[in-house]
Image: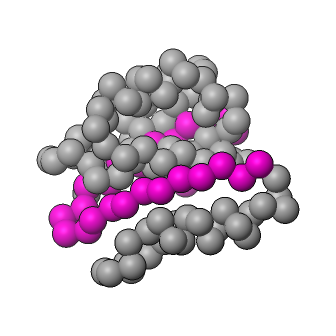
């Protein structure tokens, strides 16, 4: 497994936090950040330009962590290249908390069962 990490802030833009770029394209790109930064389509388009065909998964946080730093109103990106792992992504929208169990069941049914090791 190889990891490339970047952090975006309003003050500094994107800063690489790993010494070298990935030797191969990533299998998965995780992006964590505050709501305003995650809703910024320009930032997402920039991420997509770096990783044009990779799976990108994002989530909002109350604080973004990279190395030993905790930030607010930032984005933290981890691009991960797995050597032997297969990634499958499914998604759904939860309109209200009353529907969360139903949506969870729908997502579980959409995932392949054979060889499944982890769900996030």
Name which residue lies at 28% across and 53% down. 27
Q: Return the x and y of residue 3 as percentages of the image width and height.
A: 31, 53
Q: Quadrant of residue 34?
A: top right
- State the quadrant of the N terminus: bottom left
Coloring basis for residues: one colour
Name which residue lies at 39% across and 79% down. 113
- Residue 64 visible in the shown view: no
* Count of residue discs: 0
Name which residue lies at 19% across and 69% down. 84
| Up/down of 110 relative to 6, above or below | below
Q: Quadrant of residue 41?
A: top right
In the foreground, 41 or 24: 41
| Up/down of 68 relative to 83, above or below | above
- Residue 63 visible in the shown view: yes
Q: Return the x and y of residue 59 as percentages of the image width and height.
A: 60, 48
In the foreground, 5 or 61: 61
On the rendered structure, is 78 left or right of 63? left
Is residue 88 in the magenta section? Answer: yes
In the foreground, 80 or 39: 39
| Up/down of 26 relative to 73, above or below | below
Main secondary-structure element of the magenta-colored stretch: loop
On the rendered structure, is 96 left or right of 29? right
Residue most extreme to the left: 23
Q: Which stretch did the figure color magenta? A: 67-95
Name which residue lies at 59% across and 66% down. 106
In the foreground, 40 or 10: 40
Q: Return the x and y of residue 72 as percentages of the image width and height.
A: 69, 39
| Up/down of 49 relative to 17, above or below | above
On the rendered structure, is 4 left or right of 83? right
């Amino acid at each position: 497994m190889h990891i490339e990490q970047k952090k975006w802030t309003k003050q500094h833009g994107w800063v690489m936090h790993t010494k070298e770029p990935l030797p191969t394209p990533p299998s998965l790109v995780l992006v964590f950040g505050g709501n305003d930064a995650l809703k910024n389509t320009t930032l997402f388009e920039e991420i997509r330009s770096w990783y044009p065909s990779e799976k990108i998964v994002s989530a909002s946080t109350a604080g973004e962590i990279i190395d030993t730093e905790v930030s607010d109103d930032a984005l933290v990106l981890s691009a991960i290249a797995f050597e032997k792992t297969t990634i499958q992504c499914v998604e759904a929208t939860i309109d209200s908390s009353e529907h969360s169990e139903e949506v969870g069941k729908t997502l579980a049914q959409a995932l392949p069962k054979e060889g499944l090791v982890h769900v996030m």
